[in-house]
Amino acid sequence: MTLSKREKYLLSLAVGSILLLLTYHFMLKPAMTRRDNLQRVIPGKKEDLAEIYQLAGEYELLEKEIAQLSEEIPRPEADFSPLSFLESTLDEAGIASWSLSRTQEVRSERVMQVVIDIRIDETGWRELINFFQSLDEAEPSLRLSRFDIRKQRGRGQGLSANLTVMGVREPE
């Protein structure tokens, strides 16, 4: 079967049209859809990126502030023992009846925070004040975080106290 020149021309025109339609349908239309989606999404992503840069800057500032604050934290000597120090301070203050218990330790990379509960029975105001002054003057890495002082009933004229002392030291 031989085709005439006119038929060949119409056939090549039809094949070319089909190729153009297939190219448009499978290549150009998806590319244009993707471009439209990107144009819609890019402004939001730019805002997210700006927020990430802002948060990164804040993070760096906070890291510098943490480093500065950790330098300002009073550090006791390496062999400092908060329990031994408190025992001797209680004895020096003239407090006869007391008990200590380490209730909590919180460790981080830079410091270890120790929480010690102290129970004092049958003591007077003078002894408590002496203890508080000794604690305040002697060791900057220890601080009194909570105290409850009550007059004892029925067991003499003394005072009882529950104290919580927090200490900061280098991690072991």
Image: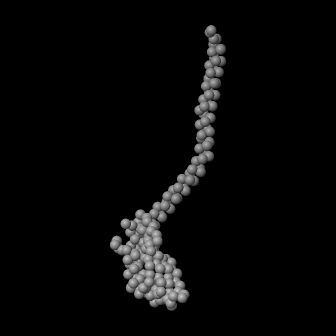
User: Residue 79, located in which quarter of the rendered image?
Assistant: bottom left
Residue 163 location (% of width, % of height): 48, 79
Residue that extends furthest to the front in the rendered view of this protein: 154
The foreground one among 53 and 76 is 76
Q: Is residue 69 above or below residue 44?
A: below
Q: Is residue 107 above or below residue 121?
A: above
Q: Residue at x 61, y 36 (%)?
A: 30
Horizontal arrangement in the rendering, residue 15 relative to residue 117 (left or right): right
Residue 164 location (% of width, % of height): 48, 77
**Which image quarter is the C terminus in?**
bottom left
The foreground one among 129 and 88 is 88
Horizontal arrangement in the rendering, residue 155 relative to residue 15 (left or right): left
What is the number of callouts on the image? 0
Residue 68 visible in this rendered orientation of the protein: no
Q: Residue at x 50, y 84 (%)?
A: 160
The foreground one among 129 and 48 is 129
Residue 70 location (% of width, % of height): 42, 69
Tell me how the rendering is colored: one colour
Q: Is residue 80 above or below residue 152?
A: above
The foreground one among 78 and 36 is 78
Residue 74 location (% of width, % of height): 40, 74
Q: Residue at x 40, y 76 (%)?
A: 83
Residue that extends furthest to the top in the rendered view of this protein: 1
Q: Residue at x 44, y 87 (%)?
A: 127
Residue 2 visible in this rendered orientation of the protein: yes
**Which image quarter is the N terminus in?**
top right
User: Residue 114, located in which quarter of the rendered image?
Assistant: bottom left
